[in-house]
Image (tube, grey):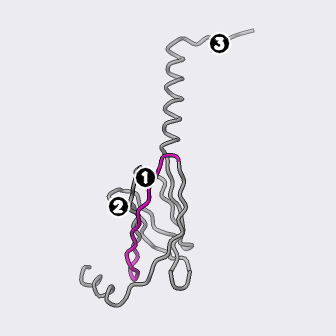
Amino acid sequence: MHFTTYTLRDRRILFLGLIYLCCSISSWSQITGTILDSKNGKPLEGVEVFINQSTVNFITDKQGFFQLTENIPQGYVDIILFKKGYRLFQSSLRTEPGRMYKLNLAMERATKRTALLWKLVF
């Protein structure tokens, strides 16, 4: 019978690797969801979904689905939705390590006044 013996150095490396793996898994968060038109309930394609003051962003697909999975800041974050012809949407969310969040959001069409303002700005 052959037993593998590990040196103290091998055990430390294994232990530190396990700690790193546990910490990286527990600090991961995910935000997914669907964005609909508030009037007709249809999915909105092409909505820019992003977390304010970060590089985390996504553009919704044909089903209005979005997924934010990388570099999500922990604590309070502002989620912003933007689509031309719709009112800008902003909402705060408190994120915690290791949690998954599923959001179902609706956007309102912009009024003529809002549309005129967007034309002036852009």
Q: Is residue 69 left or right of residue 112?
A: right
Residue visible at 71% across and 10% down in the picture? 2
Q: Mark 1 Cα within 10 Å, few/some/many (few <14, many 20+)? A: many
* Residue 94 position by quadrant: bottom left
Please, is residue 83 above or below residue 54 in the view? below
Q: Which residue is mark 3?
A: 4
> In terms of secondary structure, where does tag 1 sit?
loop
Report x, y in % for residue 26.
51, 41
| Residue 5 lies within the magenta run | no
Q: How many marks?
A: 3
Q: Residue at x 49, y 14 (%)?
A: 9
Q: Which of the marked residues, 2 or 1, is nearer the chain's N terminus?
A: 2
Between the residue at mark 2 and the residue at mark 3, the CA separation in whole angstroms equals 52 Å
* N-terminal-most mark, 3 or 1: 3
**Residue type (three-letter) at the residue carrying disc 3:** Thr
Residue at the spot 50% in from the left edge and 76% down from the top edge: 44
Q: Measuring 37% from the left and 75% from the top, which residue is drawn there?
A: 88
Membership of 89 in magenta stretch? yes
Q: Earlier in the sequence, mark 2 or mark 3?
A: 3
Residue at mark 2 to residue at mark 1: CA–CA distance:
11 Å
Residue highlighted by disc 2: 52
User: Which residue bears the numbered disc 1?
Assistant: 72
Residue 89 place in picture, x, y as percent: 40, 72
Pointer 2 with pointer 1, Cβ within 8 A:
no
Q: Quadrant of the C terminus?
A: bottom left
Q: Please report the bounds of the magenta region as a residue range.
A: 82-98
Looking at the image, the residue that sits furthest to the right is: 1
Q: Is residue 7 left or right of residue 4?
A: left
**In terms of secondary structure, where does tag 2 sit?**
loop
Amino acid type shown at disc 1: Ile
